Image (cartoon, rainbow, N blue to C red):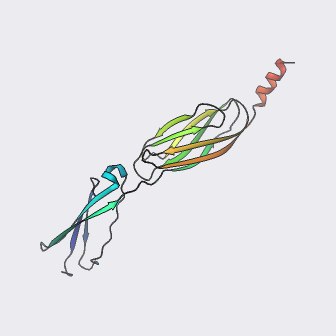
Amino acid sequence: DPLDSFELNVDWGDGSRNVYTFPPEASRNVRVTHRYLDDSAVPNGRAAVHLLWRDQNGGSNSGDLSVKVVNRPPTLGALVQIGRLTEGQPANFRIFARDPGADPLSLRVDWGDGSVTEELTVPPGVGVAGLAHRYASGGIYRASISADDQDGGTDVSTQTLRVSYNTDVRTVIGSIYE
């Protein structure tokens, strides 16, 4: 009846449920949205959505939909240098790493200087990682960071870093050989 308010109960198929209430003047063509936080929460990447409509007079109807859920890849920001970048000195960085779902992110950092690739995990919802590295020698390096959400989503950020020479160290070394 167009003069009745109605309620829509939605079971999204991933363990979450919502109830929407619509006044009598609301359109009967409604649109509701849901964000699936992890595509692995639904079997075979498909969610069985169950809908149940009810009005205040006891009328009801139901229906089912099959919804394809796909993984959205993580995103990496630029590597942000905190302070000076000088050879032989520890340097601190941060990088913004976000997953649109609820996946932890595995980061792999290649500092571009031949050192061992660093690996770390960014927990779901954190969105930023702190990093530290010491370059043995001044120069220009190309650092590369990759993010993997373990659901097939990846992103890569590459950045050129300029490491200053430590002139104090070079002067001391030079005087030893004279």
Tell me where residue 141 sits by quadrant: top right
Position above or below: 132 against 42: above
Position above or below: 176 against 125: above
Q: Residue at x 45, y 54 (%)?
A: 72
Q: Position of residue 155 (x, y in %)?
A: 53, 49
Tell me where residue 87 sits by quadrant: top right
Q: Residue at x 50, y 36 (%)?
A: 120
Report the number of numbered marks: 0
Q: Is residue 67 left or right of residue 80?
A: left
Kindly give the residue lying farthest to the front in the view shown.
44
Q: Is residue 33 left or right of residue 136?
A: left
Q: Is residue 41 left or right of residue 6?
A: right
Position above or below: 87 against 125: above
Q: Would you say residue 38 is visible in this rendering?
A: no
Position above or below: 88 against 20: above
Q: Position of residue 33 (x, y in %)?
A: 35, 64
Q: Is residue 64 left or right of residue 143?
A: left
Kindly give the residue lying farthest to the bottom in the view shown.
2
Kindly give the residue lying farthest to the right in the view shown.
178
Q: Position of residue 8 (x, y in %)?
A: 23, 67
Q: Quadrant of the N terminus?
A: bottom left
Q: Position of residue 99 (x, y in %)?
A: 45, 50
Q: In the image shown, does 110 or 164 lie closer to the viewer?
A: 110
Q: Would you say residue 110 is visible in this rendering?
A: yes
Q: In the image shown, does 158 or 136 lie closer to the viewer?
A: 158
Q: Quadrant of the C terminus?
A: top right
